[in-house]
Each structure stands twice: as structure tokens, then as C-alpha cells.
Image (spheres, coloured by chain):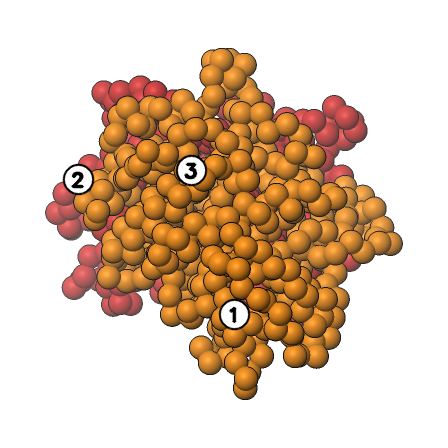
Chain colours: A orange, B red
Amino acid sequence: MFRTRRTLSDGREIIYYDHAPTARDAADRRDLPTTATLSQRRFDPLLGEWVVYASHRQTRTFLPPADQCPLCPSTPGRDTEIPESDYDVAVFENRFPSLSPRHADLPPHAAGAPLTPLRDGYGRCEVVCFTSDHNSSFARLDPKRARLVVDAWADRTAELSAMEGISQVFCFENHGEDIGVTLAHPHGQIYAYPFVAPRVATIAGRAAEYRQSHGGNLFGDILVAEQASGARVVAANEEWTAFVPPFARWPYEVQLYPHRRVSDLPGLDDAQRDAFAALYLDVLGRFERRFAAPMPYIAAWNQAPTPRAGASGDWWLHMQLFSIRRAADKLKYLAGSESGMGVFISDTDPETVAAELRDLG
Amino acid sequence: MFRTRRTLSDGREIIYYDHAPTARDAADRRDLPTTATLSQRRFDPLLGEWVVYASHRQTRTFLPPADQCPLCPSTPGRDTEIPESDYDVAVFENRFPSLSPRHADLPPHAAGAPLTPLRDGYGRCEVVCFTSDHNSSFARLDPKRARLVVDAWADRTAELSAMEGISQVFCFENHGEDIGVTLAHPHGQIYAYPFVAPRVATIAGRAAEYRQSHGGNLFGDILVAEQASGARVVAANEEWTAFVPPFARWPYEVQLYPHRRVSDLPGLDDAQRDAFAALYLDVLGRFERRFAAPMPYIAAWNQAPTPRAGASGDWWLHMQLFSIRRAADKLKYLAGSESGMGVFISDTDPETVAAELRDLG
């Protein structure tokens, strides 16, 4: 993996990840104004969670036509976010980030709300372009390119984890218009949060309790049981197993676990990275073939909190891949029970979903 | 309020709530087969939450044409879920419920998953028809009818709370196709869960901690601060205040609190019920007028767990009303950050939303 750092005309960083050494010296010819993002976060005293406010994002680019795609390489006639005329994998700071640089002079609480602590919305949001081919998708990458994306995720995680004040690095892909994706070009995102994400905090707490009460690793014991049973395994190779969790909450949900525990992406060795790329492409292909209609999905890396946020303890890196499509012509909406009370009602069952996906091999 | 209980041809219960004494003796002329629903629930050992499986619901009625609406009164030529030729408010057991009667002989865990406890999906799901007028909406009910709905909610909550094994009663309305509503007729739903809902469990835990550390009522202190500040108050009357929470996580979110604490709907007295109906209609009208496009919403009553599930402690009944519409032509999707990590990113800010809604009075 060959990495080149450059700077865009408004000061944002862009990092190229290449298969082979390649000169990446094209300058950003645009005269972009520096964007002033002023995100906030406020603490919800009822649920005990931070909420991020990024109201400047209302004006962000929304499904531009393909010939105006900001993630395609630049051409002599058109300058995009990526100055080069081609690239393998490119990562750059989001122009419309949810999380912003430090900004000072905020009062300690939201105005007139002493129970709602207020902080700046510090953090960093990056865009990860998987390929320069606008019409491709992650599922259609070749294994070598998928591996390069894994390397980029790992490299960015290591660097962002070392940044002052960052507690959680989240690499993910939102895929499909049905899930609100605003740019069709194959890409994912990385959020570096200034707090441990609620999902990770909850799971880490339960893994610690499990260690105390059972003496084992909660993730590892789940993985071993799924491997032994096989009822919900979708696919596996020497290093990874992909299974529908017996407690899946999404209509189509697969989790991918490495057999050898690591707590985050930088911890993966070469064999694990190659094997992940192979298995993930396999599973994404099954997702794509499941219905004639497009399969929207969210692919969410669950990593340990950063070292500065505390010991990674028992954390076991895994990918949670899930879709809201529940049938050929139906989506799952999060309505009253899910969004109001936090009770998920599933219209599918895990064993059936696993069998369907297995049969699509 | 006048209540009449009847039984539909497949054994489900229907309850009419009338403004004046009315004979409700129409028989269900259909020959409906008894539905065998076999919901399950499984415990997610990572998040520590129950997930309900109701895969039989895949075949439920989906946006039927208006002349086949199952929630309209029956006519000589067409039998609906409601045998009467007219009604004020009618509540009946859902024909496609997410939660089902008791069914026995389940193994203690999901097959091959010793860490995933399995139980039947016991509970009850009811449909609440607000009016016989197919083309109306809650926002267009007159105050007297809205009050009758409050009485129906309270009456059903009292009865369902007394049912064996029920820990949480949730009265709610999903409104609008954008939020996945499958029937256009003005109606809401009631879920009687066999466990305390995750949202309520979390908030109750934090309210108890707050009592210990601050000596006050968390809900009450939030309410008093909002009343004093006024910055986020949308509307208020003698008994209730509607405000945008300073920590709102939805693009449009309003919470309605009674000034005098009660823990659940049956605890509301006459004055509180009338005043809620008036204020809620006011706020719903503001929601409707905010955009030219329809405003989808979820209206979620946050009640204390049932008495059998534990002491209601400091719980303060409130309504959480929220929409995923973030602009005239844009919806908020729960994507990677929200659905993957549990971190909500808001594109609006609470003070601006409150001012917009105040101006629509």
C-alpha cells in the first residue's frame, strides 16, 4: 500500500492509497472558500447520550447528476474533490462534516437548559472513495482493491485514534438511495467521534459483565456457538465467519467476525485482511442477488474505543452489515416501537435469512 | 365515556368508546379463520435487549384502496374490522399482531445459541380508530373527540397493565406513508409488551440516579427549566407545556409534559385530559402547517412500566412527538451513525425549530 498526502485548496486533507507507487501531485485548481462548520453536541439527560447538531449540513450536495459527481476524478474541463485524473482509493475530509474542528467560547449548557451540557461538535468526518469508477460498487471491486480499502480503513483508524480528544473511530458505508445516500459514487465514510458511541459503550459494558459472571469472552463465545451450530452461518473461510446473529434486529443482517481476536482494524494482520476482503465480497454478492430490487445496506465496523478512551478489554472487532429491505417490494421502517420505545420488531427470522443467503452462494 | 365490548368472528375483542350511550350490537358477519400468530422474542446478549420476531406479518395488508379500508365502518355490501355502521372511537385486537398469545413448548434458547434466550412473543397489539371518517386525521378531530381518544388510551392502559405478564403499555400513532404507515385511515396503536421497553428502562435508571445525586425529579427539573427559559416552548396551557427538548434528536421533535406529575395515562384527571387534547391539537396543527409536503410523524406516549413491573418511582408521563421530515423536500434517514453506532446527528437546531413552530400559531 502506497500513501500520498495532499491538501485541497480550502485546506482539507486528501490521502491517496495506491496499489503501486504513483505520483499524486495534481494541484486542486479550485478556489474553494474555507468552510466554517460549527457543530455542537448536547447531552441528553434522559437517555444519557450525546446528540450532534450540524444544521449547516441542510445545504449539502444532494444526488447530483453523474456528470457532476464530486467523487469522480478531475478532468481538464471539470474539477472535483479529487484533483488527480485517476485514483485507486482516495480519502478526504468531508466538505460538509457533521463533526467540526475545535471552536471555543461556548457556554457550558444549552441556553436556559442547565441539565443539557453543551460542547463543540469536535471530531472529524472523512469520505472514502473505493474506486474512480462511478458506476461500480463495493460488491464489484476485485479482491485486491477491497484489500486496499481495508488497508485504508486501518491506516485512517490508526491516525484518527491518535488524534487529541478522539474516543471512537467508525468506518462505515451507507449504500443505496433507500437508505438516504446522497451520492451514487461508490464510497464510504469515517467518523472520528469525541465520545464512545452508545452502541459500543453498551456492548463493552455487557462484555465486561459477562467476563465477570462467566469468565469468558462474550463475542468469542457467540462466535464459537455459531460456528458449532452452523444454522445461521452464511459463509466462512480460514480467518472469518459471516453469520446472521440469532438475535438479528434488521430484516437482513450479517455479522462478520475474525476467528483470531483483534480489537480494531489496525490490529488485523495480512492474512486476516485478505480473508476479510474475500469473505465480505462474497457476502455482499449474496445481498445483491437476494432481490431483483436494489439492496440498500449499512456496513458498520464495530471497533473498540480508542486507546485514550480506555482499555479495549474484551472487544472483538466485527462488521455489522444490515439492510432495511424486508421483501422484494417492501422496506422496514423504524416506526413507533423501534424509534419510540427502542423495541425492534423483525418481520424475518434469522435461520430463514441465513438459509436464503447460503443458497445464493 | 361509554364503553361497549364485543367480539369479532375470529374471537378478537373490539371495544367501542362513545360520546353518548349507543347500542353497539352489530354482529361480525364475516367467517374469519382464527389466526395463529406465533411470535417469538429473543434476547440480544450484546445490547441486552429483547428483539421480537413476527415473521407472519410479512403478508399483512399493505395500503389497500380507500374503498377496501378495513378500519371504515361496515356497510351492507362490505364487512370491515368494525361491524358497526358508524362509530366514535373503536379499539380492537390487531389481526396481524407483532405480539401474540402465550404459546408453550419453546426451548430455552434459540437453536444452537446458548447465549440467546428464547421466549414466546407474548403480549397484545391493538388498533385504535380515532374516527369513522376515512379522510380525517388526528389533527382535524374536534377537541371532544380528541378527549375521547385520551379516555380510550387511559382505559386500555389500565386494563392492559392489569394483564398477567405485561410490563409496559405503549400508546402511539405512526402517521404518514413516509414513515411506513400501511393504512391511511386515522388510527393509532397500542402495544402491551412483556418487558420494560429499552427507552423507558434507560430513562427510569437515569431518573433514579438523578434523584440520588441531585435530590430532585429529572423530568420535573427539565420541565421547570423549559418553562422558565421559554426559548424552546412551542405552546402551553394551564395544565401542559409543549417544548422542543434542548437535546432533541429528531429534525422536528416536541415533548408534551403535564405540569402536575402523573406516571401514566390512567393517572390523568379530567382537567389534564381536556387540556392535553387542546394543546396536542394545537401542536399537531403547527406540524401540519410547517411544510407544504405532508408531515409524517410518530406520536409516542412515554408511560411508566406497569405496576407489576416495579415502582413507577419518579416517572413523569409525557408525549414525544417527532418527525423525520427535515426540510420541505427532504427526510432524515437513520443511516450509519444513528443505526450503526447510536449517535444521532441532527440537521436542525432546537431553538430554531421551536421558533418556527411558535410562529405557526
Quadrant hosting residue B121: top left
Side of A306 relative to B338 (left or right): right
Asked whether residue A274 is in view, the answer is yes
Side of A144 relative to A89 (left or right): left
Q: Give the alpha-carbon distance from disc 3 to disc 2, as whole Å.
A: 52 Å
Residue A174 lies, in percent from the top left, at 46, 56
Give the residue type at disc 2. Thr
| Chain letter of disc 3 in the image | A
Image point (78%, 57%), residue name: B231
Image point (53%, 29%), residue name: A315
Asked whether residue B353 is in view, the answer is no
Q: From this viewpoint, which residue is outermost toward the right?
A: A105
Which of B166/B6 is in front? B166
Q: Give the alpha-carbon distance from disc 2 to disc 1, as whole Å.
A: 56 Å
Residue mark closest to the camera, 3 vs 2: 3
Which of B232/B14 is in front? B232
* Label ID, residue B34: 2
Residue A64 lies, in percent from the top left, at 49, 76
Identify the element where label 2 is drawn. Answer: loop
Above or below, B334 relative to B262:
below
Residue A334 lies, in percent from the top left, at 44, 50
Task: State the residue position of label 3.
Answer: A272
Q: Are marks 1 and 3 on the same chain?
A: yes
Identify the element where label 1 is drawn. Answer: loop
| Chain letter of disc 2 in the image | B
Q: Give the alpha-carbon distance from disc 1 to disc 3, as whole Å.
A: 29 Å
| Chain letter of disc 1 in the image | A
Residue B359 lies, in percent from the top left, at 70, 70
Give the residue type at disc 1. Leu
Image point (27%, 39%), residue name: A234
Task: State the residue position of label 1.
Answer: A71
